[in-house]
Amino acid sequence: MNPEGRKSKAELEELLKEVQTERKQLSDIFNNAPSFMCVMIGTEHVFERANECYKQLVGNREIIGKPVRAALPEIEGQGFLEILDQVFKTGETYRGTDIKVSLQSSDSPDKLEEHWLNFVYQPIRSPDGTITGIFVQGIELTQRKKAEEALRAMNKTLEERVEERTSSLLSYQKQLRSLVSELSTAEENQRRYLATELHDNLGQLLAMCKMELDLVKGGKLPSPAASVINKVTELLNEVISYTRQLMSELKPPPVLNKEDIEAYIFWAADQMKKHGLTVSVQSNDEPKPIDEEAKIPLLQSVRELLMNVAQHSGVKKARVTTSRLENQMQVTVEDEGVGFDSEEEFIESDDGGFGLFNIQERMEMLGGRLELVSVPQQGTRATLFIPLKSEEKTGTPDRDNEKKSNSSVQTSFSSKLDQKITVLIADDHEMVRKGLRNLIEKEADLVVIAEAADGTEAVKFAGELFPDVIVMDVNMPAMDGIEATQLIKKKMPEVYIIGLSLHDDEQVSNEMRKAGASAYLSKTEAFETLCATIRNEFNPSV
């Protein structure tokens, strides 16, 4: 440097070289920046500079030296020109986020392509503060937006597929539930069919054989014949007992065919004795009628729960409680056994029964539910909830289409002598009626005045003939013996009714007595005690 403080020519050249190097570095940075950049000058926003990224954004068009309106005519009406004017006028920076712009395609000038941008419009000022231009810088989000849209489309497709699959699964589940219900109903119907066949055919024939043998035994027979008859009678008794057991296991006794399900539950609890389980049943007196289609699933569910107690709990006692909770019937089966972790998967029964999961499914199908609480070493409580039958569904059964019988009625009262006890026989099996008639009419003081083939005829003949005693079978079509007994006793309280059934069941006997019968006999013992029972009921002093 010279003494006057001025730079030498060499120094100035060195300084200029450094400035040019810095400008080149800045230019390289500008041109190669990963974000798009440009500089617009003046109120017309003339492109002074643009980096490679910006040029690619606008389709590599010749834009330098051109006003933005001329260089990018397609942006007219998209709002960007107005924003540039506002920034140049106010000097306030503008930041755009997720902004869509349509630009001319590099492949076809007539085609527009959508681009998504994040950008900044920043005013450029001269040393005196005057705004001379705008610096534009930003990044393109188009690929990200396309990826997001593709992801949203994929998610939508997946959701639609999931919804479709879910709908299909729900449909399959509904079909499966329907099939399970039909299978369960078919199984129960088959059980009832077999029990009915046993009762109506084999059971009645065995009872008649026993009756006939009892008649023969009443006469005088040679010792060898009497011994054979006694042996055959013993075998018949064993066969009859076994037949009764089969009927009991296959089908509830006829007394249970009522609106209220509780009789079924008492019966199911009593059946558990053969599995070594004593079950106590508690119930209040509130009526709990449920729909007919709900009876079989509920009864099977109670059976299954009790079988679970018998097989898995390790105890010999259980409790069943029934109650009415608003419009639902509540049945609780509980024990104090080993319990299990109720959070784990529901167990299935060893004998291929419902299992707790399937009980839950069945309850939900009927509009109810299963609530299960079990704690290891403390016991298990399972509660079934079943909707009650709506009031409008209840009513008196229509009997217009009841089965008509071919019963023979003796309407003549010439044989009804004052000194004889008149008897009406009600049984749906003609062979049994004839056997009972032969037995009764051998007695000098007894006379049969009519035979009825079902409960409806029994009520009709009782009102017309006023018998002293009615021998009433429990299980009959059209109207069973319990209902017929109730109707007859309501109109004719003075008549004596003797219940008769193949079922040697205490509950059946109790229901007949509750209906108004003063005595109850099983058919296998009828030939031995029927006549004496008739006399005793009509004239207790005899």
Image (cartoon, rainbow, N blue to C red):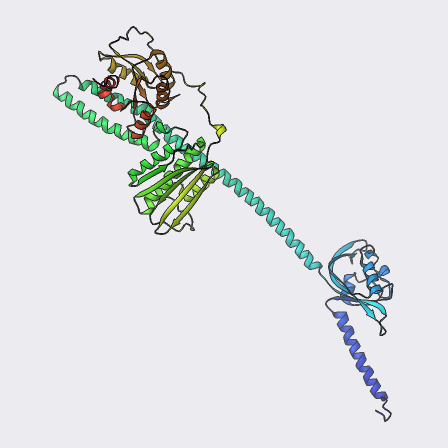
The answer to whether residue 501 is left or right of residue 225 is right
Given the current orientation, which residue lies at the most extreme bottom position?
A: 3
Residue at horizontal 55 percent and vertical 45 percent from the top: 166
Residue at horizontal 75 percent and vertical 72 percent from the top: 29
Q: Nearer the viewer, residue 285 or 40?
A: 285
Question: How many marks are shown on the rendered structure?
Answer: 0
Q: Nearer the viewer, residue 529 or 392?
A: 392
> Which quadrant of the view contains residue 98?
bottom right
Q: Residue 406, can we see it?
A: no
Given the current orientation, which residue lies at the most extreme top position?
A: 414
Q: Position of residue 485 (x, y in %)?
A: 35, 21
**Vertical side of 358 occupied by 521: above or below:** above
Q: Position of residue 38 (x, y in %)?
A: 80, 67
> Which quadrant of the view contains residue 334?
top left
The answer to whether residue 212 is left or right of residue 252 is left
Q: Residue 205, can we see it?
A: yes
Q: Position of residue 326 (x, y in %)?
A: 47, 37
The quadrant of the rendering that contains the N terminus is bottom right
Q: Nearer the viewer, residue 84 or 147?
A: 84
> Which quadrant of the view contains residue 198?
top left
**Vertical side of 437 occupied by 392: above or below:** below
Residue at horizontal 23 percent and vertical 19 percent from the top: 540
Given the current orientation, which residue lies at the most extreme left position?
A: 223
The quadrant of the rendering that contains the C terminus is top left
The answer to whether residue 187 is left or right of residue 231 is right
**Vertical side of 272 occupied by 430: above or below:** above
Q: Position of residue 213 (x, y in %)?
A: 21, 20
**Vertical side of 391 occupied by 371: above or below:** below
Q: Nearer the viewer, residue 500 or 512?
A: 512
